[in-house]
Image: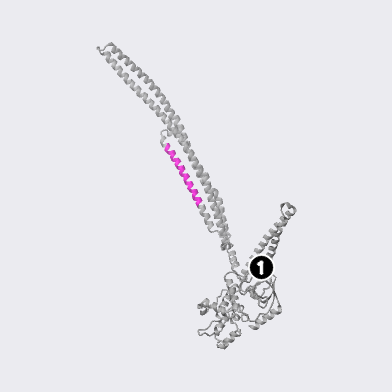
Amino acid sequence: MSWGTELWDQFDNLEKHTQWGIDVLEKYIKFVKERTEIELSYAKQLRNLSKKYQPKKNSKEEEEYRYTSARAFLATLNEMNDYAGQHEVISENMTSLITGELTRYVQELKQERKSHFHDGRKAQQHIETCWKQLEASKRRFERDCKEADRAQQYFEKMDADINVTKADVEKARQQAQLRHQMAEDSKAEYSSTLQKFNSEQHDHYYTHIPNIFQKIQEMEERRIVRIGESMKTFAEVDRQVIPIIGKCLDEITKAAESIDHKNDSQLVIEAFKSGFEPPGDVDFEDFTQPMKRTISESSLSNSRGDGKSEPKFGSKSKGKLWPFIKKNKSPKQQKEPLSHRFNEFMTSKPKIHCFRSLKRGLSLKLGAGPEDFSNLPPEQRRKKLQQKVDELNKDIQKEMDQRDALTKMKDVYIKNPQMGDAASVDQRLAELGQNIEKLRLEVQKFEGWLAEVEGRLPPRNEQARRQSGLYEAQNTSAVNSCAQDRESSPDGSYTEEQSQETEMKVPATDFDDEFDDEEPLPTIGTCKALYTFEGQNEGTISVAEGEMLYVIEEDKGDGWTRIRRNEDEEGYVPTSYVEVYLDKNAKDEYKSLQKISE
């Protein structure tokens, strides 16, 4: 089955068919090119999608990824990134193995096709030229034959005419012979041209054209084979990445199977557990018994002038408030402007203690918690302290690694003075030693607080374990009580009911000595300043490292200790900045005085 024998007369159709084959090949190249662009676009979109949902560094989202479900989602994002990479590989391989190769092949195919059809046209032109020569020889032979026939007829006519001279007859005879000779020559030429044409035609249709068409057929078959191989490569490129894509999908499945709902539930407990005990039963308050009191100006003045008040029902009967139970404000508290309450607070008598409570409340509101995290619930405080200890230990390890490296460098300098001066690293070594010592002191300090939280050491006092929610409730109630302490009735007189209501709302822990500011507090011990503290806020006092001072009031759980330098200088310093040495006798006497005053 050969195009040369079967399609010897279909030169034009073969030319159109081969051009169609090249068009198909170019169309397939365009298809693969668009596929590679789609793969690249898809990979880019997948990468952007994965990047969009990746957790931001140093953000709250990073903390969420300790849960197994969030970690599984993160693993899915990472696997999708690898999945996108495989689509980029598909695009690159198709571009190099299919698009690039076929583009070069199409150029070669066009040149080869052009050459073959040029040879075919040349062969056709040659046979057409031979045919024209044959036709010309044939027409000449025909013409000469006709001329010889006419010359013969003229000679016979002249020979039969008696009136014609012998010379004219001879001339006509010679002319007839000449024409016959020319006809014979044309016949011989025609015969020779015909034989030559037949030979050329035979070679054309049985040799030249079949060879040319065979080459065109082979070219076309190579094109068909090449496009088939490209289609196989197209599928193979996809098949090569299927194992890796399958591995990505397996990893996503593995990540999904690693989700542990029990573990996540336990992490929620660890993250939000406060360590508090549930609240006990609420005591019954009997309002059927009328309160025995005399509302008079004299009793009011005695109550306010002597600094003695009725028993603080709020501190005795209710005890500590549960952190998430909020007290209802009275209508007057809700409607009274904050500026008026602040003015009343500034003009009230116990403003020093109220200011102390207000300052502590504002510090908690603004997030500037104490160094020992005492504003947090016990369990959260323990976690924060443990985290701080771990961070400090890491810093110590870094400093020790630097010190060891400098020590080795110094030894090298001592052994080989030409490499450097050993004394040049002494200053840095001294700085590292100081840094390590400071960090160790910090670790000891936080480990002490951690041991106290974990119950390995006895707490300083019972109030050191108060909840952060209780702090905020007490501070808020303290400000309200200070502002309401000097509220008056519409007629300008003070009411004892308002005073008692204020006392019931204010826990005794914040105002256990609020009417004793006029008398100096007794000394209950001494303390040594561990660090320098710049007391820039009102109510605080500046101390220098190593300074010995007198303690006049213990830390009540808010992280502050009240100290005295002399009779005129006293104030509060952070408890973590001082080392307290309490005098047992003085402390017992101080507690007994507090009980008497209560």
Residue farthest toward the left in the current orientation of the protein: 163
Q: Which residue is mark 1?
A: 446
Q: Secondary structure at mark 1?
A: helix
Q: Residue 61 occupies which quadrant of the picture?
A: bottom right
Query: Against 319, is 576 above or below?
Result: above
**Residue at (40, 27) in percent of width and height:** 130
Residue 118 in view (yes/no): yes
- What's the amino acid at mark 1? Phe
Residue name at image x 33 percent, y 15 percent: 177
Q: Nearer the viewer, residue 270 or 265?
A: 270
Residue 342 image-quadrant placement: bottom right
Q: Which residue lies at the image location 66% right of the left edge and 82% below the top edge?
A: 593
Magenta span includes 24: yes
Queried whether the magenta region covers residue 566, the answer comes back as no
Residue 369: x and y, percent?
60, 70
Residue 6, percent from left and from top? 43, 34
Q: Is residue 497 left or right of residue 201?
A: right
Segment tinted magenta in the rendering: 14-41
